[in-house]
Image: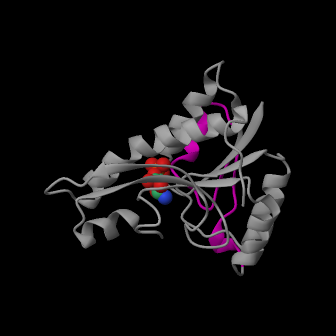
Amino acid sequence: MLTVAVLISGTGSNLRALLEAARRPDFPARIVVVGADRDAEGLAHAAELGIPSFTVPFRSFADRDAWGAELGRRLDEWEPDLVVLSGLMRLLPSSLVARYAPRIINTHPAYLPEFPGAHGVRDALAAGVSQTGASVIVVDDGVDTGPILAQERIPVEPGDTEETLHERIKPVERRLLIDVVRRIATGDLALTP
Ligand code: GRF
């Protein structure tokens, strides 16, 4: 049974979908812990579903490396087979990536390599494209530059705002993420750096 740690910063709607998928007896992975870099709303999903969680507040540390070292220590306590970044709005320090790579994956609300970074939805809208997408990738030292594990095109509709477009993207992200975790757990999908 693949053990999974999920890291979040926000509302955790993607986390919720993964938690619910993992509760099904036929799902080949278990979420063992949820971590956050702040007092994220999404931690409530872990509490509601009885999954342990921890918070390593970014602002409590002198710098990214110190924060990453503590985050690594908390993750090591659970020895997860896979780390899923699902709305974590922080770049992991390279020391932490090196420790877990390539067993760290991330969801991104754009069709990478289009629109990487923290504002993929906003950037797609600003670019005036007619379609964007959702992607699941392996985390490497870059910003959303790792190997693409799954992605799907999503239309941009006239009159879309960042919110309406992001809400159209998230369900696709969730479906891709759940499928990627399942395929990693069954060995169908091998993670390579
Ligand atoms: C997701 O679209 C994720 O790809 C992006 O931020 C969003 C998080 O949404 N990094 P939620 O916290 O899962 O609702």
Relative to 68, 139 lies left or right: left
Quadrant of the rendering where the C terminus is positioned: bottom right
* Number of marks in the rendered image: 0
Q: Measured from the top left, where is residue 162 in percent x and y?
A: 28, 60
In terms of depth relative to the viewer, which is nearer, 149 or 5?
149
Magenta stretch holds residue 186? no
Q: Can residue 11 be seen in this view?
A: no
Which residue is most to the top? 25
Q: Measured from the top left, where is residue 145 in percent x and y?
A: 57, 68
Q: What stretch is highlighted in magenta?
A: 34-61
Q: Is residue 40 visible?
A: yes
Which residue is most to the bottom? 62
Which residue is most to the left? 158
Relative to 36, 151 lies left or right: left
Magenta stretch holds residue 46? yes
Identify the residue at image location x=14%, y=56%. 158
Please name the colour scheme applied to the rendered image. Answer: one colour
Q: Measured from the top left, where is residue 119 in percent x and y?
A: 40, 68
Image position of 83 with respect to 31: above or below: below
Identify the residue at image location x=56%, y=59%. 88
Image position of 193 with respect to 52: above or below: below
Q: Measured from the top left, where is residue 125 in percent x and y?
A: 26, 66
In the figure, residue 181 lies in which quadrant?
Answer: top right
Image position of 39 with respect to 4: above or below: below
